[in-house]
Image (spheres, grey):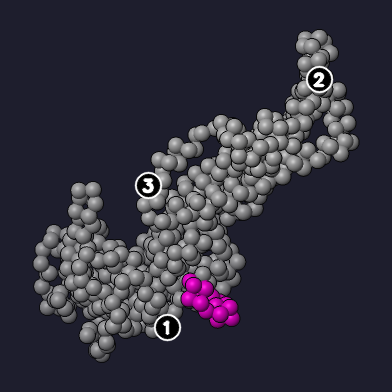
Amino acid sequence: MRGAGAALGAAGLAAFLALGEAVPRLGLVKEEYLPPTSRIAGALGREAADGAFWTALGDTLTGWALGLALAVGAGVAAGVVISVVPYLREATASTVEFLRPIPSVALIPLAVLLYGTGLRSVLLLVVYASFWQVLVQVLYGARDVDPVAEETARSYGLGAWARVRHVLWPTALPYVMTGVRLAAAVALILAVTAELVIGAPGLGARIAVAQASQAVPEMYALVVVTGLLGLLINVGARAVERRALSWHRSVRGEVAV
Amino acid sequence: MSLVEGRSVDPLLTVSGLRKVYEGAGRRVEAVRDLSFTVGAGEFVCLVGPSGCGKTTLLKCVGGLLRPTAGEVRLGGGPVTAPPPGMAVVFQEYGRSLFPWMRVGRNVELPLRQKGLGGERRRELVADALGSVGLADAADAYPWQLSGGMQQRVAIARALAYEPDVLLMDEPFAAVDAQTRADLEDLVRGLWRERGVTVLFVTHDIDEAVYLGQRVIVLSSSPTVVQEELAVDLPVERDQLHTRVAPRFAELRTRVYEQVQAAKRGAAPVEDAGARTYPPR
């Protein structure tokens, strides 16, 4: 079954690439706007040979990774504190619901005012967008703590910190993992957006330059790279999730008893 | 002081004038009205009562998990205001009480870490406790890989490893099948005799209460008071086959059954000269 699924997936992708080759060649769209697959692949090869491309890729990944790490750290810490301190959840709920829907891109002018076009601008946007994904999941996860598990921990003399570590954290972990996976995707979007709009160094800025200089195949090649990055990030996040949650019923599957 | 098989023992656990009223959202529920009883050191006492009679509320108050509205619980002379170190609880819902993210060995070990015991001592206690419930080989399994009965054995092992003075058991076998239940009853009685731990066992099963306990305390329906206390004068050596068909077992279970029925109706204790009873104090 798995093999057949993979074969079908590969066939679908091949058909899509062939369509990308055929449509501009048949003159259905202008080649200047949509170069055939082979020309995009050629541009991708030239990019890979260019040191500046790798620097840009490194810049984008730096902004993504730093921003994600900050967001996850802050989101987990804030989520645990809000969940553990009595009444804090109720007190913060309305503020969270107000701040969360603000689109990160609306903060671009603020980021430029504060930090200009450097890495810190990218980080501001990435962290703002990813933070809420993690925070909200931690808050949901912490609410899922089983009262029997909590009472067991209390009856065996586990203090507040030990209960956070041994009961709340493992309970919330599946939610946290979902939050991190969502945040990783959002962080990439925001990193590229910031580079594209603000001009901070990275793949986004390189796409803007390619577009401005009419290097259309290169522009497409760079877009393909960002797509591949997103794919790799998602696959990586799922692998981490599976490892960390091997005990969880969503991962462990049916057990014969 | 209470009488146990002819000898008197000092009370280890004293519950006096316990009352619990739940207040919330315009509703006021008096779960426990006025409960007083004692459990002597090394005693095996069963609490039985009609369903919904506040047994779990009582056990949570005794375990220091719930603050009573009035009255107090004392363990070894000191008042219980938080879960005391000398007490371990075995819950009915073993699947939720064991942590699925930890292997069996770690589940048993965690409370010992919190106690600050050294690694050597912890390993000793874990191995000993798992061995005495017949699960010496299961330390590396996850709880959810075991059957229900085995999971409850793990929960019992966790309680034993904690080396409590008092073991509180809240309907521990209500969720396992009948045969497993009989095995677990014998296991708990065996462990009690072996280790001299004091057991307070809450159940709704009259036969189980009479089979296991040295003394049965019958609770009234909610708001709860003590309906009757009854000494179980069966021999110390008990087994599923012979004890349960002994004439004295039948008399005692009938007696308890009558009291539980009376409790449901809200009537006063039924008088019966054949059983040695203690009126509620």
Please tell me if label 2 and label 3 are on a single chain.
yes
Amino acid type assigned to the residue bearing label 1 in the image: Arg
B127 inside magenta stretch: yes
* Badge 2: residue crowd in 10 Å (few <14, some 14–19, many ≥20): few
Q: In which quarter of the image is residue A44?
A: top right
Judging depth in this view, the residue of A11 and A254 nearest the camera is A11
Amino acid type assigned to the residue bearing label 2 in the image: Gln
Residue drawn at x 82%, y 36% as measured from the top left: A53
Residue drawn at x 27%, y 88% as measured from the top left: B9
| Residue B104 position within the rendered picture, expressed as x and y whole percent measured from the top left | 54, 66
Q: Can residue B227 be seen in this view?
A: yes
* Left or right: A224 as drawn, with respect to B123: right
Q: What predominant SS class does the magenta segment belong to?
A: helix
| Mark found first going from the N terminus, 2 or 3 | 3
- Alpha carbon distance from label 2 to label 1: 85 Å
Q: Report the residue marked by disc 1.
A: B195
Q: Which span of residues is magenta-colored?
A: B111-130
Q: Are marks 2 and 1 in contact (CB under 8 Å)?
A: no
* Badge 1: residue crowd in 10 Å (few <14, some 14–19, many ≥20): few
| Residue B185 position within the rendered picture, expressed as x and y whole percent measured from the top left | 39, 71
* Badge 3: residue crowd in 10 Å (few <14, some 14–19, many ≥20): few
Amino acid type assigned to the residue bearing label 3 in the image: Glu
Q: Residue A26 carries which label?
A: none
Q: Report the residue marked by disc 2.
A: A214
Residue farthest to the top, as pictured: A27
- Alpha carbon distance from label 1 to label 3: 48 Å
